[in-house]
Image (cartoon, rainbow, N blue to C red):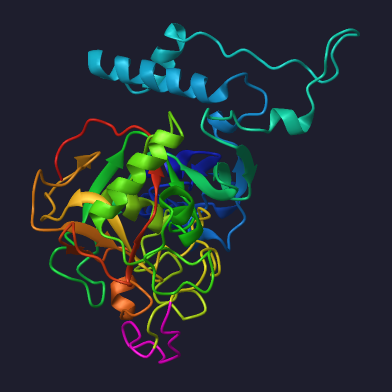
Amino acid sequence: MFDLLHEAELVIADVSSKVEDVLLALGIRFGLCPTRTLLVAAQGSVPAQLTALRVLHYRPMDMSPGIENAVGFRSELVHWIKQVLTTRAVDSPVYLALPSLRPPRRLPDPASAEGEVAVSEAAVDTPEKPPWASAVGRDEYGRYAEITIADVRQRFRWIEPGSFRMGSPPSEPERNADEVQHTVTLSRGFWLADTACSQELWQAVTGGNPSRFQDDPRNPVENVSWLDVQTFIAELNRRLPHLQARLPREAEWEYACRAGTTTPFSFGDNITADQVNYDETAPYAGGKRGWYRGRTVPGGSLPPNMWGLYEMHGNVWEWCADWYGAYRTGAQLDPRGPQEGGGRVLRGGSWGGLGTYARSANRSRHEPDYCSHFIGFRLALGQEQPAEAA
């Protein structure tokens, strides 16, 4: 690959994912011919390490404003590529897949002939609306959809499939032994709530509120067990057919928390109380001591990560679907965790926790019937992919 980089007149590098490989290749390329290297990235997917560089943004295929049912076309393309890969070894499976693929249907030209209805730019850019959604849209973070229960809204972000390094490297300060780093691929995208479940949403579904901090209905619901959450989800799915609400898998949670980053936090190597609601009197890795709120804050109060997700670090611990267990070594596809265990996974840290607990890789767990005013949850949507154990 490096020989090709040296000989090429122009190098186009997509920096949307696999940051380490891109940086290694570009480090060599920049030393040879920096003016002929073009950086491109999908909208909303520029890694934090590269935000200072000039990057040309493009819309992924499933966001194309010119293709009718772009999401379906992308899905079909992926299907045919997988078919090709299972039948033969090729250098470019995309090219062999294309002859089997029906060409995408283009949307009508806005400057169409007289008598035809022109499609407005706003209509073209509006994502396809799932049957359960009360509203959909797109912003600087990508696609979103909302649900409404008794006038209470919850926004969900579309999380694209992809690969990442789960766990922490040996060099990460204050890491734990159960954070063995390994590559994980999530083959199917999913919707994830942009905030932890609020008290107002919980109350709209259940009629009650077990939380300690009830001064603001936007505060995350806490003092709920994993079993309580399953009852809540069952009722939510009953009210909104086709929603397929669930808890995120542990791998899904960390993938979304990192949002393309490889640092201890999605904000970088350390955090402050202005970014994360945690006990800053116990900072991470020699950081500056700060202040301590001693309570939760309303969802969406603090800065989001690069995928538009709020309070993935701190505020409340978040239940995950998996039983806790040791990671398998080696690459994994859609991991699910062990079949049984002594506790369900908790992620993210809380308003009362140390800085290290809020790291992207940090893991905790509790019995499914345990509840605490440090613990809440975040909803995921979408059918799960049949997968191997973690």
In magenta segment, residue 344: no
Task: Give how far across and how far down residue 201 sits, in percent.
Answer: 48, 53
Task: Kindly identify the residue that appears in the image at 50 percent across and 74 percent down.
Answer: 275
Most frequent secondary structure within the magenta stretch? loop
Residue at the (36%, 61%) spot, across then down: 262
Which residue lies most toward the right here? Answer: 114
Q: Residue at x 56, y 50 (%)?
A: 152
**In the displayed structure image, the side of residue 340 where residue 188 appears, left or right:** right
Image location (x, y in percent) of residue 202: 43, 55
Q: Residue 203, percent across and down? A: 46, 56
In front here: 274 or 1? 274
In the image, residue 229 above or below residue 271: above
Q: Nearer the viewer, residue 339 or 215?
A: 215
* Depth check, front residue: 370 or 283: 370
Foreground of the two, 272 or 170: 272
- The quarter in which the C terminus is drawn is top left
* Residue interval drawn in magenta: 281-295
Residue 199: percent from left, percent from top = 46, 61
Q: Give the vertical position of 285 relative to 228 (above or below).
A: below
Above or below, 385 against 324 in this view is: above
- Residue 285 in view here: yes
Quarter occupied by residue 226: bottom left
Queried whether the magenta region covers residue 284, the answer comes back as yes
Q: Is residue 143 above or below residue 132?
A: below
The count of marks equals 0
Q: Is residue 359 visible?
A: no
Q: Residue furthest front?
A: 207
